[in-house]
Image (tube, rainbow, N blue to C red):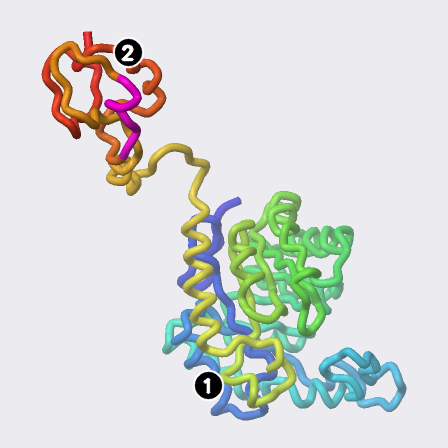
């Protein structure tokens, strides 16, 4: 697998995890707030800012039938119609250009999740550098083909998809022209529980599909995301808002700026800590070797005196013979006067 380049960021095991701040509907229908979210994401250390490109009419029907309403009593959006949710959460298409321009000014990679072919056509006019396919669309093979046909990098969330469905989606994308593919392990519940995250799937998915892999995380906090880095996640996506107390369709499971900053710092630390298989002292351990225990003469000795349990001990620092030679030295006689505090060495004997 070769590394993937998106904008000015290289993605792969030799690079810090690619951190995506997902705005979703947290703009609360205010362009000014959307631009503030962009600025906060850049300041927090995110590498990219993602939005979503759809309208209520491209997502569903304005229909009174029961199946067009959220009936799950555990859902954040229970009782709402799908149409009203998407109407509230969508990012107006005329906002895309100013949002992406602000991203560019601040060094963020701005891109989007399109939800139908018309959204892809629109985003192509804005020359986005890559595309994200949301979990609920990962079985929409015509949409997968449409996006793959642009030749741009594709990031696909795998929430709810079976292994067979992921395989079909990956094959479809590659056959339609996608060269650079990233799969994200995702649990499509809001918020998700750490117990349901199963992030050990990430390295399996990477090996099985021979592509970069990462995490789209809907859990609270940053623990799951940081842990995923140790399992090889090269991309992390988290929903992002200015303040959860401000409300919004996704605010409850979104990170605030201080949390995103902490994720940026800790995910980089986690990545740096992986390294390679290593035993023995590292380069920065060398100075600490002197603080190991070693054998020292702990009483003044005259030539010919015998080494006993009272005259030699294993103490710090580590400038004498290793403690493993303690029994070997017992009974030996010194060949000269030895002062208390002398590190034991072979030339003192015989």
Q: Is residue 152 visible?
A: no
Where does the image place residue 174, in percent across and percent down from the top left?
64, 52
Q: Specify few, some or many for label 1: CA neighbours under 10 Å numbering under 14, 14-19, or 20 or more.
A: some
Q: Quadrant of residue 323?
A: top left
**Quick check: is 41 in the magenta stretch?**
no
Where does the image place residue 221, in percent across and percent down from the top left?
56, 70
Q: Quadrant of residue 173?
A: bottom right
Name, please, the residue furthest toward the left: 337
Picture residue at 44% right of the left edge, 76% below the top: 258
Depth check, front residue: 102 or 264: 264
Please identify the quadrant where the C terminus is shown.
top left
Q: Nearer the viewer, mark 1 or mark 2?
A: 2
What kind of element bears circle 2? Answer: loop
Picture residue at 30% right of the left edge, 21% below the top: 309
**Quick check: is 309 in the magenta stretch?**
yes
Where does the image place residue 166, in percent across and percent down from the top left?
72, 54
Can you tell which mark lies on residue 331? 2
Q: Specify few, some or many for label 2: CA neighbours under 10 Å numbering under 14, 14-19, or 20 or more.
A: few
Name, please, the residue furthest toward the top: 350
> In the visual, does 61 lie left or right of 190?
right
Q: Is residue 70 visible?
A: yes
- Magenta residues, as a range? 308-315
91, above or below 188, in the image: below
Of the numbered discs 1 and 2, the one sitting upstream in the chain is: 1
Name, please, the residue furthest toward the right: 65
Depth check, front residue: 97 or 271: 271
Can you tell which mark lies on residue 35? 1
Depth check, front residue: 34 or 178: 34
């Amino acid at each position: 697998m070769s590394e993937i380049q998106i904008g000015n960021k290289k993605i792969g095991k030799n690079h810090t995890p690619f951190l995506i701040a997902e705005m979703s509907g947290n703009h609360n229908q205010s362009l000014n707030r959307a631009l503030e979210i962009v600025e906060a994401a850049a300041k927090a250390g995110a590498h990219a800012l993602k939005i979503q490109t759809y309208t209520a009419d491209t997502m569903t029907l304005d229909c009174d039938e029961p199946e067009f309403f959220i009936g799950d009593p555990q859902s954040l959006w229970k009782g709402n119609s799908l149409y009203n949710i998407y109407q509230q959460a969508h990012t107006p298409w005329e906002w895309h250009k100013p949002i992406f321009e602000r991203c560019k000014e601040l060094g963020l990679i701005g891109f989007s999740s399109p939800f139908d072919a018309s959204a892809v056509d629109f985003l192509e006019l804005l020359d986005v550098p890559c595309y994200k396919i949301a979990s609920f669309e990962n079985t929409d093979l015509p949409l997968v083909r449409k996006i793959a046909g642009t030749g741009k990098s594709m990031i696909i969330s795998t929430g709810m998809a079976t292994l067979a469905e992921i395989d079909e989606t990956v094959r479809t994308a590659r056959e339609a022209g996608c060269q650079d593919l990233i799969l994200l392990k995702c649990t499509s519940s809001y918020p998700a529980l750490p117990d349901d995250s199963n992030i050990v799937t990430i390295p399996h998915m990477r090996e099985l599909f021979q592509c970069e892999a990462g995490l789209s995380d809907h859990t609270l906090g940053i623990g799951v995301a940081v842990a995923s880095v140790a399992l090889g996640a090269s991309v992390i996506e988290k929903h992002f808002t200015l303040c959860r107390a401000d409300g919004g369709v996704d605010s409850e499971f979104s990170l605030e700026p201080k949390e995103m900053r902490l994720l940026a710092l800790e995910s980089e630390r986690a990545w740096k800590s992986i390294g390679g298989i290593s035993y023995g002292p590292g380069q920065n351990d060398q100075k600490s070797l002197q603080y190991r225990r070693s054998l020292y003469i702990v009483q003044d000795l005259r030539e010919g005196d015998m080494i006993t349990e009272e005259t030699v001990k294993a103490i710090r620092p580590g400038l004498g013979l290793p403690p493993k030679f303690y029994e070997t030295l017992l009974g030996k006689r010194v060949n000269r006067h030895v002062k208390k505090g002398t590190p034991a060495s072979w030339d003192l004997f015989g």
